[in-house]
Image: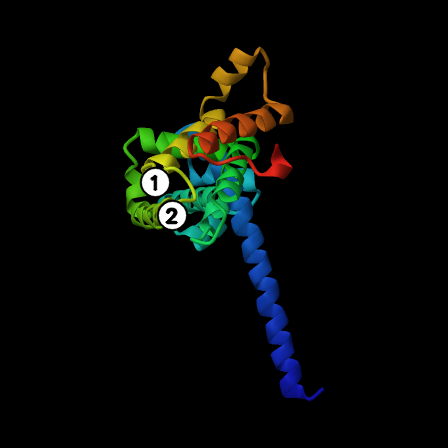
Amino acid sequence: MDTAQKRLNDAFRTRTKAGRIRQQNEAKIIKAAEIEFAQNGYKGTSLNAVADRAQLPKSNILYYFKSKFGLYGAVLADILEMWNQAFSVASIDSDPAETLYRYIEAKVAYSYTHPLASRIFAMEIIQGAPHLEAFLAQDLKVWLDDRASVIQSWIDAGKMKAVNPHHLIFLIWGSTQHYADFSTQVCWALGKKEYDQQDFQDATATVAMIVLGGLGLTIPTENR
């Protein structure tokens, strides 16, 4: 291998390694920040506390996210991306029953695996969404309108009953995120200290049956 090619290969490996390290550090910081923001709110969270929990220098947080405000925006963006990805790939040609079932299933699963994320978002909304407005409100509105147009296309094609697409999405949000936002209430009502996997399977089946049934759809055969 000639010297020039070797330098190029070495440079590529260095950039790739640096990219992986950055991704790993950013993921650690966001995970730590999620815990701190959920426990203490935006005002009560300090970058020092996030750094301690992430076991990284505070300077790393400032390097990647610039400020607490920037870090909080990244956490909100991460939450919304996680929530919405199961429905983001739906198109006019997608099967509405399959698509909506998978979206409900994913949203209930996230309430089980990422309860803190839902609580952070709920606190943000209850407080009037001061930070969401600055970072993500427009992007979320664009996403919502685009997804609503897909649902409307299914309605126009006679694939499901006519409903207001935006309110259908709100219904799915509310019914699935309830299991994270009001976990204490739900567990108390179920007579247990915490959820188990069966609870979330039952929640998915119940919400899906009511939502899809109301739309004139049936749960996909493999999930009955």
Front residue of 167/120: it is 167
Q: Give x and y (percent) for residue 128.
A: 27, 33
Q: Residues within 10 Å of mark 2 (few under 14, many from 20)?
A: many
With respect to residue 41, does 48 lie above or below?
below
In the current view of this chain or complex, which residue is farthest to the front?
Answer: 158
With respect to residue 38, does 195 lie above or below?
above
In the current view of this chain or complex, which residue is farthest to the right?
Answer: 1
Q: Say which residue label 1 marks.
A: 165
Q: Say which residue label 2 marks.
A: 147
Mark 2–mark 1 distance (CA, rounded to whole Å): 8 Å
Question: Based on the displayed image, in which of its 4 quarters is residue 165 positioned?
Answer: top left
Q: Is residue 118 visible?
A: yes
Q: Give x and y (percent) for residue 160.
A: 42, 40
> Number of callouts in the render?
2
Amino acid at circle 2: Arg
Q: Please state, as top left, top right, bottom left or bottom right, where the N terminus lies in the image.
A: bottom right
Query: Which label lies toward us, 2 or 1?
Result: 1
Q: Residue at x 69, y 89 (%)?
A: 2
Element marked by disc 2 = helix
Q: Residue at x 40, y 47 (%)?
A: 154
Q: Residue at x 46, y 50 (%)?
A: 90
Element marked by disc 1 = helix
Image position of 125 (left or right of 65): left
Amino acid at circle 1: Pro
- Asked if labels 1 and 2 touch by Cβ distance under 8 angstroms, the answer is yes
Front residue of 141/11: it is 141
